[in-house]
Amino acid sequence: MKSSTPGLITSIVEVTNISAHGFWILLNEKEYFLSYSNFPWFKETTIDKICDVQLVNERHLYWKQLDVDLELSSISNPEDYPLIFK
């Protein structure tokens, strides 16, 4: 017996607000805040690049234009993922 090909991910990730301190994304009816202090890669970029986010799988987001990929757990618990890049 052959397994069927998995379907496309139907969840959509959406940037809902951008402020001077960070931005919010909405995924599966839950909103996440990404502060620029915890995620400095987004601080000096354009709105278009922040909004160009893709859901790779149910736990992984990717910003192709910025070459940034993040697991949702790092957004929910940034203190568990200290920055090494300076």
Image (cartoon, rainbow, N blue to C red):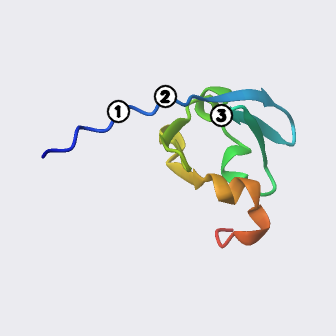
In the image: residue 55, left or right of residue 80 = left
Quadrant in the rendering for residue 82? bottom right
Under tag 3, what secondary structure? loop
Q: Which residue: 71% across, 35% down?
A: 25
Q: Is residue 79 visible?
A: yes
Residue type at numbered disc 2: Thr
Which x, y percent locates residue 8? 38, 31
Q: Which residue: 75% across, 62% down?
A: 78
> Mark 1 and mark 3: span between their CA atoms?
17 Å
Under tag 2, what secondary structure? loop
Mark 3 neighbour density, 10 Å: few (under 14) some (14–19) many (20 or more) = few
Of mark 1 and mark 3, the one earlier in the sequence is 1
Considering every residue shown, the one lying at the far left of the view is: 1
Mark 1 neighbour density, 10 Å: few (under 14) some (14–19) many (20 or more) = few
Q: Which residue: 24% across, 38% down?
A: 5
Which x, y percent locates residue 21? 87, 43
Question: Mark 1 near mark 2, Cβ–Cβ under 8 Å?
Answer: yes
In the rendered view, tell whether residue 17 sits above or below residue 34.
above
- Residue that mark 1 sits on: 7
Q: Which mark is residue 36?
A: none
Q: Is residue 82 visible?
A: no
- Residue that mark 3 sits on: 28
Of mark 2 and mark 3, the one earlier in the sequence is 2
Mark 2 neighbour density, 10 Å: few (under 14) some (14–19) many (20 or more) = few
- Residue that mark 2 sits on: 10
Quadrant in the rendering for residue 13? top right
Which x, y percent locates residue 32? 76, 42
Q: Which of these two is toward me, 59 or 36?
A: 59
Residue type at numbered disc 1: Gly
Which x, y percent locates residue 66? 54, 44
Question: Mark 2 near mark 3, Cβ–Cβ under 8 Å?
Answer: no
> Mark 1 and mark 2: span between their CA atoms?
9 Å
